Image (cartoon, helix red, strand yellow):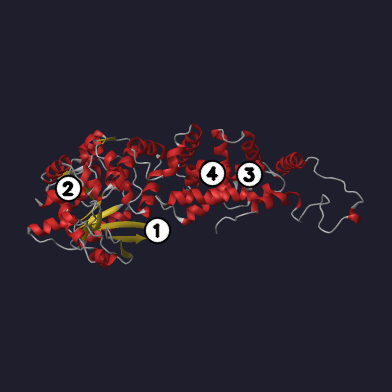
């Protein structure tokens, strides 16, 4: 009765409730044990440090397994990027066994075990907690009594938002929408498996016995290349709306089909993304964009209607053929670099995603009579202010974005000796790649990109020829003869001589530095 009341408060329909009850009844307690001659995991792909963690815990009397995405990738014969370990030891017990280990996290407490630059995330098995009961207790700030008056009070008053100090005293708490705020109740391995998101991520590998423990038919779903949510999808999305983004990322990255029941609630629950802290959304979005399948991920986001809350300014861009081409080229280039193992700048990527909006506002401000450089900086600030309301882009990436954008007018001119100084700019390569993308998309004259390509690849003599060509074209018949000669000139008058010791390109620097300076 209480569960039904809480579900009505959360806005769950009867179909959701029935699915959730059915999911609760299907919680397996015994795993299928898959031997090495069946799973064919290559031990050479396994991190030695991850094995050290599991061995140390097992020798201390605990159970310990490699878990999650690492097991999934090993089964797909792909070398995992990172390794997680799950154990029945508490965070404090894990910390005592390793010299360099620290407990981190409030919402989901884990231990970072560090070996040089390598970090093995180690978590304790989580227990299954009834989300409906927890929502009722956290909403009222305590456990409800068993009488009808308590139920009437719960239905009459909106749930109270818990303070940080109250949350810190709880091991488990959820908010009014069902999102889990704290999840630090320790349990058994089968409960931990059920708490995980997808069947393919809920398998445990024991390096000592080389066996895989499979509670939710993850092996079968890997063979069928199907992405399936454990439990009732609607409930799981309410617990953590970021799971909707993870569905998209894994489906695009692995080339898996999304199970129809897993996909069905996404469209109507997409607005729950707005409840996720902006910083956490940024982290998940970064994983998505740097997955090596960014273009496919973005296409999936649009297909599921999830892109509106993440990149609000991108909605308009993707409806414009020119803007969509530029973004597609940027994402394809990023994917190629990730797959080739080359470094990728998140600042460059977000600069490309938001460039069309910056340019549109820049053109609007200059058309209104503003000077170009101040207008550009104003456009940059407006776009970033609008974007960060939804997705908190880190300041270091924002600084990179602004520098890339601010260098575009100077790269378009490529006049005088400014080009030589631009080569020494720490963000030149990123800004140069940005110009080449603009040329490739048709936004900028291809001759601009060709000039800079020749300049970057040319030797000293070739660069001098290019500079002289640019100087001749830029200067033209600018010098004017004054009446009375130099002797009659007033101090500070324009006699055609360079305005500073920097030579002919002083005008360019003045243009570039006038108006608002980029944020430090």
Residue 79 percent coordinates (x, y): 34, 44
Residue at 30% x, 61% y is 105
Could you give the CA–CA distance between mark 3 and mark 1, rounded to whole angstroms? 38 Å
For mark 1, does the 10 Å Cα neighbourhood hold few (<14), some (14 to 19), or many (20 or more) residues? few
Label 2 – label 1 distance at C-alpha: 48 Å
Location of residue 147 (image quadrant):
bottom left
Q: Residues within 10 Å of mark 4 (few under 14, many from 20)?
A: some
Q: Which residue in the protein does label 3 denote?
A: 411
Q: Which residue is mark 2?
A: 8
Quadrant (top left, top right, bottom left, bottom right) of the C terminus: bottom right
Point out residue 378 in the picture as x, y percentages from the top left corner: 55, 50
Q: Is 455 positioned to the left or the right of 391 in the image?
A: right
Per the rendering, the mark at residue 319 is none
Task: Name the element at disc 4.
Answer: helix
Q: CA distance from mark 4 to mark 2?
A: 45 Å
Image mark for residue 117: 1
Return the disc, 2 or 3, that comes first in the chain's sequence: 2
Element under label 2?
helix
Which residue is label 4 attached to? 361
Closer mark to the observer between disc 4 and disc 3: 4
Dot 3 or dot 1: first in sequence order is 1
């Amino acid at each position: 009765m209480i569960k039904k009341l809480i579900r009505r408060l959360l806005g769950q329909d009867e179909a959701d409730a029935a699915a959730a009850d059915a999911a609760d009844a299907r919680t397996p307690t015994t795993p299928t044990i898959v031997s090495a001659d069946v799973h064919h995991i290559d031990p050479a792909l396994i991190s030695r440090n991850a094995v050290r963690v599991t061995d140390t815990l097992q020798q201390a009397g605990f159970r310990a397994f490699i878990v999650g995405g690492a097991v999934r990738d090993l089964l797909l014969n792909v070398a995992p990027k990172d390794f997680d370990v799950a154990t029945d030891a508490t965070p404090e017990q894990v910390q005592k066994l390793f010299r360099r280990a620290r407990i981190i996290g409030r919402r989901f407490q884990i231990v970072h075990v560090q070996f040089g630059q390598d970090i093995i995330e180690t978590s304790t098995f989580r227990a299954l907690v009834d989300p409906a009961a927890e929502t009722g207790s956290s909403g009222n700030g305590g456990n409800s009594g068993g009488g009808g008056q308590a139920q009437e009070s719960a239905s009459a008053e909106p749930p109270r938002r818990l303070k940080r100090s109250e949350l810190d005293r709880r091991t488990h708490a959820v908010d009014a929408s069902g999102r889990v705020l704290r999840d630090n109740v320790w349990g058994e391995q089968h409960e931990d498996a059920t708490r995980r998101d997808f069947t393919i991520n809920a398998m445990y590998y024991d390096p000592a016995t080389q066996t895989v423990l499979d509670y939710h038919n993850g092996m079968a779903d890997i063979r069928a290349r199907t992405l399936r949510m454990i439990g009732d999808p609607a409930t799981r999305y309410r617990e953590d709306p970021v799971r909707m983004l993870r569905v998209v990322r894994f489906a695009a990255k692995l080339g898996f089909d999304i199970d129809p029941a897993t996909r069905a609630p996404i469209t109507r629950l997409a607005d729950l993304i707005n409840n996720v802290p902006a910083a956490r959304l940024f982290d998940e979005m970064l994983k998505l964009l740097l997955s090596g399948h960014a273009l496919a991920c973005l296409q999936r986001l649009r297909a599921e209607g999830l892109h509106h809350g993440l990149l609000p300014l991108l909605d308009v861009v993707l409806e414009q053929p020119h803007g969509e081409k530029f973004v597609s080229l940027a994402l394809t280039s990023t994917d190629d670099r990730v797959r080739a193992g080359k470094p990728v700048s998140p600042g460059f990527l977000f600069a490309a995603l938001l460039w069309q909006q910056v340019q549109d506002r820049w053109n609007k401000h200059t058309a209104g009579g503003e000077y170009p450089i101040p207008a550009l900086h104003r456009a940059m600030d407006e776009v970033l202010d609008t974007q960060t309301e939804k997705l908190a882009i880190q300041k270091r990436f924002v600084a990179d974005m602004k520098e890339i954008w601010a260098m575009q007018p100077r790269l378009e001119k490529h006049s005088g000796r400014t080009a030589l100084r631009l080569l020494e700019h720490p963000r030149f390569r990123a800004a140069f790649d940005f110009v080449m993308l603009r040329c490739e998309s048709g936004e900028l004259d291809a001759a601009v990109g060709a000039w800079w390509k020749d300049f970057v690849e040319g030797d000293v003599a070739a660069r001098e020829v290019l500079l002289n060509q640019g100087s001749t074209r830029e200067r033209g018949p600018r010098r004017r003869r004054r009446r009375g000669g130099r002797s009659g000139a007033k101090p500070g008058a324009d006699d055609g001589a360079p305005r500073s010791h920097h030579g002919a390109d002083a005008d360019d620097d003045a243009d570039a530095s006038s108006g608002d300076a980029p944020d430090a």
